[in-house]
Amino acid sequence: MQKFDVVVVGAGFAGMYALHKLRELGFTVKVVEAGDGVGGTWFWNRYPGARCDVHSLEYSYQFSEELQQEWSWSEKYAPQPEILEYANHVADRFDLRRDIQFSTRVISMVLQESSRWILTTQSEEVIEAQFCVMATGCLSKFNIPKFEGMENYTGEVLHTGDWPKHEVDFEGKDVGIIGTGSSAIQAIPLIAEKAKSLTVFQRTASYSIPAHNSATDKEYEESIKIDYAEFRRSNSLRYAALNNNPNPVSALELESDERHAYYQSRWNDGGLSFLASFNDIGSNLEANKTAATFVHSKIHEIVKDQAVAELLCPQTVLGCKRLCVDTNYYRTFNRDNVKLVDIGEAGIDKISERGVIAKGEEFSFDTLIFATGFDAMTGALLDIDIRGSNGLSLREKWQDGPKNYLGLTISGFPNLFTITGPGSPSVLANMIVAIEQHVEWIASCFSYLRDNSKQRIEAEVTAEESWIELVNGIAETTIYSSGCNSWYTGANIPGKPRIFMPYLGYPSYVEKCESVAEQGYSGFKIS
């Protein structure tokens, strides 16, 4: 049996930095990764058009000044192959692979009376560790709804979240894609260029803002790198840890024409900063409607068939689902070989031998793509049979929704930590910034325990309950938690408890984490 101070599950950006940081502090660390390479999300999501929706100069590590100075991104929004190349560069530069065990899936984790964890892999290998750090990712368990007749389809089946490494040839093929979330919105324009025909099945329309992607502005890059640390520090004080130029003005303070002109300027800038156009888009329904109405007007302006344009206009609160960032998404519906099928709440009738039956009509395809998202934030954790004190399973603990303290630890599961899990900013912040903050907090905690000859740390039940109340209370001050059915609340997974999972507001979250540590890890039982 292998024994370590720490086992990290997952070798994406979180797992890689956790390995580097903890190893640097003198801990013995083993990383276990299901895939055969590093990169996490960017290892699995290889679909056409996959790229980050955060600017490249921000979506990167800051723990090494040398690394961030030497690496140069080719585009404003980095494509998946380049992000994966970056992940591999980091793994090589910091010699991480020697402590990563690839092609290994953890199937169970059991707490011992000694407060150490026993992990078992799919090949029945057993690993023991004092601490477990779950770097399993927020969007790593892909979801395929249980459509009737799935087993009957005889064509090629793909999922955007589990895309093959080889290039998929769509030339001359009739292709169907189910879903219109972020992955589909990125993939659809490129697939449409190759396929004989592309049929898009839409249940709920998504808001998307143009990326206006371009080659990296080298002068701008140089200006950032002159004082990268200050750029990072300034961004960390933003609500989502992004350089999104927030406007402190209410949308309702401006006259209609002036407001429209400002939205147009944000549309011209492109990207996620559109959400920061005014300070009350996320808190005032009337203000939000002004943003939604503007996006609707742009869709009608771009899409020639006004009936199709209307179907593409979301009827939900802007921002309550992930805001998408695209290149020519709406324009793609002007192509003769692209058809939109709005299935609404009725959904897909069934999958047939030849394709999809929806609204009583059969559509035949050579290739069927599921862009149906993920069991977000909790899915990958609950895929593992994790058993804490007195044999309590995490699935039982979270049967009414995820509960934890600081989004980092779970009462009843001592010495177990989650990176960017529910109850933390995670998916509603710059993910790499959130990852680094979590890893550094965990590393400091482990050092504190070692320095004070302590073996066990566990969240107190009262601290956990108070934290969940806080997370929910913050969400309720916005219109995002109830504005639509989204994966932020688990609404895309049948039977999953509905609870708004992310903590809103990166700077205030960091302050709370720091305060807990400064007070000798208040809210924890340490022994």
Image (spheres, rainbow, N blue to C red):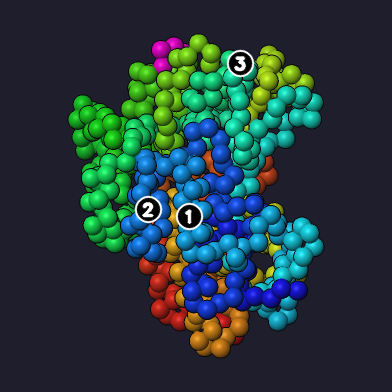
Q: Main secondary structure of the magenta part?
A: loop
Residue type pointed to by label 2:
Trp
Q: Secondary structure at mark 1?
A: helix
Please name the residue that numbered disc 3 is placed on.
172
Q: Is 426 in front, or is 98?
A: 98
Q: Residues within 10 Å of mark 2 (few under 14, many from 20)?
A: few
Residue found at x 51% / y 59%: 92
Residue type pointed to by label 3:
Gly
Q: Position of residue 450 (x, y in %)?
A: 54, 84
Q: Is 246 in front, or is 355?
A: 355
Q: Secondary structure at mark 2?
A: loop
- Left or right for 96, reference 346: left
Residue found at x 60% / y 23%: 170
Q: On screen, 112 above or below 11?
A: below
Q: Position of residue 34 (x, y in %)?
A: 66, 54
Please name the residue that numbered disc 2 is placed on.
71
Mark 3 vs 1, N-terminal side: 1
Q: Are marks 2 and 1 in contact (CB under 8 Å)?
A: yes
Range of magenta residues:
303-307
Q: On screen, 55 above or below 120?
A: above
Residue type pointed to by label 1:
His
Task: Give the Cα distance between marks 2 and 1.
Answer: 9 Å
Q: Is 498 in front, or is 39?
A: 39
Residue found at x 72% / y 31%: 147
Q: Secondary structure at mark 3?
A: loop
Please name the residue that numbered disc 1 is placed on.
89
Residue found at x 57% / y 22%: 200
Q: Nearer the viewer, mark 2 or mark 3?
A: 2
Task: Give the Cα distance between marks 3 and 1.
Answer: 37 Å
Q: Position of residue 481 (x, y in %)?
A: 48, 46
Residue 285 magenta: no
